[in-house]
Amino acid sequence: MLRQIKDWVRTIKRDVHALYLAARDPRTPWYAKAFALAVAAYALSPIDLIPDFIPVLGYLDELILLPPAIMLAVRLVPPELMAEHRAAAIRAEGRPVSRAGAAFIIGLWLLAAAALTWWLWPQAAA
């Protein structure tokens, strides 16, 4: 059963990436593009309707809302385009992760945190 869940999650992850690619494809109809982009943005966004730190309830939006939305978005994209973008998503899974890109993003977050701390920290009167 755990293997089936892992396969299902891997399929959802692949489809979300494929939907993101389909949303950027000019051959995708505008309505499918808009819905696919909204679904991909919600799935990849750290902001949820129900915050994940709330026990049990936090993951309900991912378990209840996201799978049907992904299935609907997949049905809106023409099948030949979806197959093409699924293949591209599978190829992307095998690519190495950019450590330089990750370091850059982490550096930006640290810089933003330092700037925010400096700005909010009470300044000593001279």
Image (spheres, helix red, strand yellow):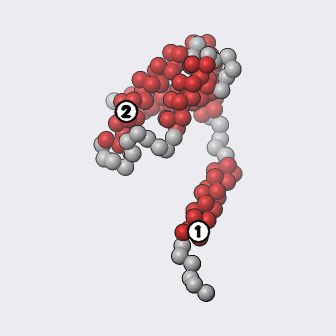
Image point 53% across, 16% down: which residue? 76
Determine crowd level at label 2: few under 14, some 14-19, many 20+ residues with C-alpha closer than 10 A: few
Q: Mark 2 or mark 1: which is in front? A: 1
Choose top left, top right, bottom left or bottom right for residue 52. top left
Choose top left, top right, bottom left or bottom right for residue 1. top left
- Label 2: which secondary element: helix
Mark 1 highlights which residue? 119
Residue 39 screen position, x and y as percent:
51, 29
> Position of 9 compared to 33: left or right?
left
Mark 2 highlights which residue? 63
Depth check, front residue: 103 or 20: 20
Choose top left, top right, bottom left or bottom right for residue 41. top right
Identify the residue at the far front of this view. 125
Image point 36% across, 30% down: which residue? 64
Identify the residue at the far bottom of this view. 126
Image point 46% across, 21% down: which residue? 71
> Position of 69 compared to 115: left or right?
left
Mark 1 or mark 2, which is nearer the start of the sequence?
2
Residue 21 screen position, x and y as percent:
63, 27
Depth check, front residue: 77 or 120: 120
Q: Amino acid at mark 2?
A: Leu
Residue 108 screen position, x and y as percent:
64, 56
